[in-house]
Image (spheres, helix red, strand yellow):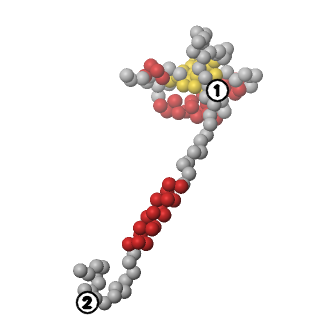
Amino acid sequence: MAMSGGKDDGSPMMEMNTTPLIDVMLVLLIMFIITIPVATHSVDIDLPVSNNDQNDPPPVDPVKNKVVLTQDNKILWNGNEISDAQLLSLLQESLRMPVEPELQFEPEENAAYDLSVKVLNVIKGSQVTKFGFVGNEKYAQF
């Protein structure tokens, strides 16, 4: 029988047999794959260790300022109504304190999104570093 399109007349085949070449290449490929080192690059991070054997709550900053946005588009600073300009001056005043107080942001349920964006931009522009959202657990859906 003729293989690779050769003739069955007994003349020598003039084509190169590539089967052994492919076999050698596959063996070399497998050897290279096996000898590649496993990527063991890691970044070590020291995570804080919980202190479950103490029942005392963690220390809390003595001064906290709370910004609340109401449903009727009012901005409340620690319960007192303020304007946008007053918010910026109060934030700048809090940054001048020796220890920056924590700023808590809590919009009410139906507070306007536009007001939230405007207040958050003022807070971001004031470069406050201790900032957090509070009261979100009220809106969690189980």
Among the 4 quarters of the image, the one containing residue 61: top right
Between marks 1 and 2, how big is the CA–CA gap?
90 Å
Looking at the image, residue 23 lies above or below residue 30: below
Quarter placement of the N terminus? bottom left
Residue 129: x percent and y percent? 65, 30
Q: Nearer the viewer, residue 122 or 6?
A: 6
**Quarter of the figure with residue 19:** bottom left
**Which kind of residue does numbered mark 2 sit on?**
Asp
Q: Please report whichever mark, 1 or 2, sits nearer to the chain's N-terminal start.
A: 2
Q: Which residue is mark 2?
A: 9
Identify the image quadrant of residue 133: top right
Depth check, front residue: 103 or 85: 103
Amino acid under disc 1: Lys
Front residue of this view, candidates 125 and 18: 18
Disc 2 residue crowd, few under 14, some 14–19, many 20+, Cα 10 Å: few
Could you tell me if residue 10 is visible in this image? yes
From the image, state whether disc 1 or disc 2 is nearer to you: 2
Q: Is residue 103 visible?
A: no
Residue 132 in percent (x, y) is at 58, 25
Residue receiving disc 1:
130
Q: Are marks 1 and 2 in contact (CB under 8 Å)?
A: no
Q: Residue at x 53, y 22 (%)?
A: 134
At a point 61% along the width and 29% down the height, the residue shown is 47
